[in-house]
Image (cartoon, helix red, strand yellow):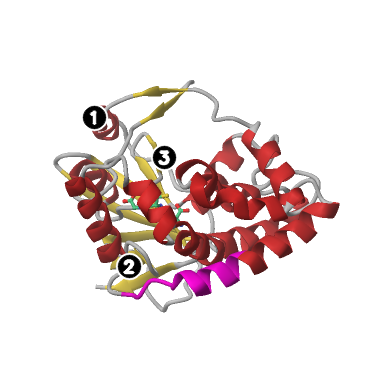
Amino acid sequence: MKRKEVHLPLVMPKPKLLALTGGYRRTPVLQMGADIYCDTSLIAQIIDDIQPEPHVYPPSCDALTRLLSQWADTMLFPALSGFNFQPQGAEYFFKEMKTEQAQALIADRMAMRGGQERITYEDAHGLVVSYLNQMNQILKDNRFICGNQPSLADFSCYHPLWFTQTQVSIVSSILNDYPFVQSWYERMQSFGHGSSIIITADEAIAIALQETPQPLPKEKYIDLHAIELGSEVEIRAQSLGTESTRGKLIAANHHRFTLERSSPEVGLVHVHFPRMDFVLKKI
Ligand SMILES: N[C@@H](CCC(=O)N[C@@H](CS)C(=O)NCC(=O)O)C(=O)O
């Protein structure tokens, strides 16, 4: 079946996304019928389960892939964002945008950081130089970040650099000093994006309403929070976009939590979150 894709608004409010997730606002999420999967690390796991060849988490470097993609998400991405939005980069990025649009985007991302200060350009630059050096060393001897096969770690490292290359190309000459990163970037780019059918958010909601969630895998409940299964809980990202989702905790394994929630708009849905970088609290 061909992948369907819904384009989300760039800034809040996102009422139709939130109808499905119950609060989580970040992009992307994966919807399969009445199951909603939040965060790329979990989405990649689901894709891997459905189509394991080739793996997104190759078994030979599963742990390394998880750690390095988390590093890319929490360290490389903010450092590169700070670098990308240096004054010259910001001017270039916002020049085609209407003033109100630019102001809305800036205000939205400030709110998303929850008052946390942005890294300075100087600090970001220092980190980016150091990270690119390390990536260059890894990629000198390896075709991909975790070895000779691509993994989620590559995609997690690729997207912030994609932003530099394509959205703020005025500052992208920094990559010229890292030839192995550059040739890896080209290898990554050549994967392309596959093809999909664009549908509306209303169509996605109608699908959730029609379907019922998939039966949960029969696995042991892993409780690391002293919260009983069946409790009303809330889950939110640890940082950046910390809007929470409330629901009934109906499953948890080493990698993910599952909440059950329902509303007249979407019916009964299961919303799944990774454990890593998410906070679980009993209400
Ligand atoms: N760890 C998350 C990060 C997601 C993330 O920060 N996404 C950005 C877009 S690339 C976002 O949601 N920005 C705010 C928004 O689009 O509302 C993931 O990998 O899915």
* Mark 2 or 3, nearer chain start: 2
* Element class at badge 1: helix
Of badges 3 and 1, nearer the viewer stands 1
Q: Position of residue 150 (x, y in %)?
A: 71, 44
Q: Mark 2 points at which residue?
A: 113
Residue span colored magenta: 116-128
How far is disc 3 from disc 1 in space, using C-alphas? 17 Å
Q: Tell me if label 3 and label 1 are in contact, CB under 8 Å.
A: no
Q: Residue 214 carries which label?
A: 3
Which residue is found at the position 31% from the left and 25% from the top?
Answer: 199
How far is disc 1 from disc 2 in space, using C-alphas? 32 Å
Which residue is found at the position 51% from the left and 45% from the top?
Answer: 169
Q: Name the residue under label 1.
A: 206
Q: Position of residue 128 (x, y in %)?
A: 59, 65
Q: In this view, does 221 lie to the left or right of 134?
A: left
**Looking at the image, which residue sits at the far left?**
264
